[in-house]
Image (tube, rainbow, N blue to C red):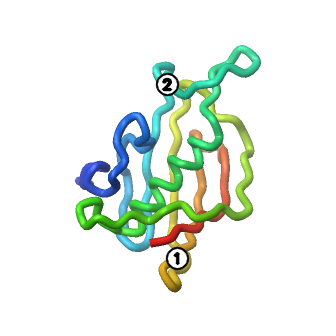
């Protein structure tokens, strides 16, 4: 299946674009994106001799997929803004070499706000999950 380019869906650009490609999109409902964490990432931190991708940027990657799921086009000048997180739990760190599968599903829209559930997978292992609140 062919998907639009990420750049046509959200205004983020490198080095602040944290979605490499889409593998599923139902505008207004759900999106699934992929982010490969390479050794050349400018934001890697060293912890215990390993290169770790910061949790805040993992959440930003998921928020970008959530914005894509909402279905706003970057060209129309609107972008859902990250307004909050609820119940987020990290179950493992993200290391250089990991490939993230970022899943966001819109569960409620009301008065200019949207709530989506988000799950981040590395292979078959869940790395994080919780809710994202965004504002139009």
Neighbour class for label 1 at 10 Å: few (<14), some, many (≥20)? some
Query: Which residue is most to the top?
Result: 49
Residue 102 as seen in the image, left or right of residue 117 = left
Q: Position of residue 104 (x, y in %)?
A: 51, 61
Q: Is residue 93 visible?
A: yes
Residue 113 as seen in the image, left or right of residue 84 = left
Residue 122 as seen in the image, left or right of residue 72 = right
For residue 13, what is the image quadrant? Answer: top left
Q: Is residue 125 above or below residue 75?
A: above
Q: Earlier in the sequence, mark 1 or mark 2?
A: 2
Disc 2, SS: loop
For residue 49, what is the image quadrant? Answer: top right
Neighbour class for label 2 at 10 Å: few (<14), some, many (≥20)? few
Which of the image's four quarters has the N terminus? bottom left
Q: Is residue 33 above or below residue 84?
A: above
- Dots 1, 2 in contact, CB < 8 A: no
Residue 63 as seen in the image, left or right of residue 90 = left
Q: Residue at x 46, y 20 (%)?
A: 40
Q: Residue at x 58, y 40 (%)?
A: 122
Q: CA distance from mark 1 to mark 2?
A: 32 Å
Q: Position of residue 95 (x, y in %)?
A: 62, 28
Residue 42's disc is 2
Residue 1's disc is none
Disc 1, SS: strand
Query: Which residue is most to the bottom?
Result: 111
Q: Position of residue 45 (x, y in %)?
A: 64, 24
The residue indicated by pointer 1 is: 113
Q: Residue at x 58, y 43 (%)?
A: 58
Q: Is residue 1 visible?
A: no
Which of the image's four quarters has the C terminus? bottom left
Q: Residue at x 60, y 55 (%)?
A: 119
Q: How many marks?
A: 2
């Amino acid at each position: 299946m062919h998907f639009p380019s990420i750049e046509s869906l959200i205004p983020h650009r490198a080095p602040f674009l944290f979605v490499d490609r889409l593998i599923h999109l139902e505008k207004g409902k759900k999106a699934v994106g992929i982010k490969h964490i390479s050794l050349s990432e400018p934001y890697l931190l060293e912890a215990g001799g390993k290169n770790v991708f910061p949790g805040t940027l993992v959440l930003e990657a998921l928020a970008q997929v959530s914005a894509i799921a909402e279905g706003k086009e970057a060209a129309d000048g609107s972008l859902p803004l990250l307004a909050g997180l609820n119940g987020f739990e990290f179950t493992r760190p993200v290391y250089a070499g990991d490939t993230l599968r970022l899943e966001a599903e819109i569960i409620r829209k009301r008065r200019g706000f949207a709530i989506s559930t988000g799950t981040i997978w590395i292979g078959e292992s869940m790395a994080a999950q919780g809710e994202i609140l965004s504002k139009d």
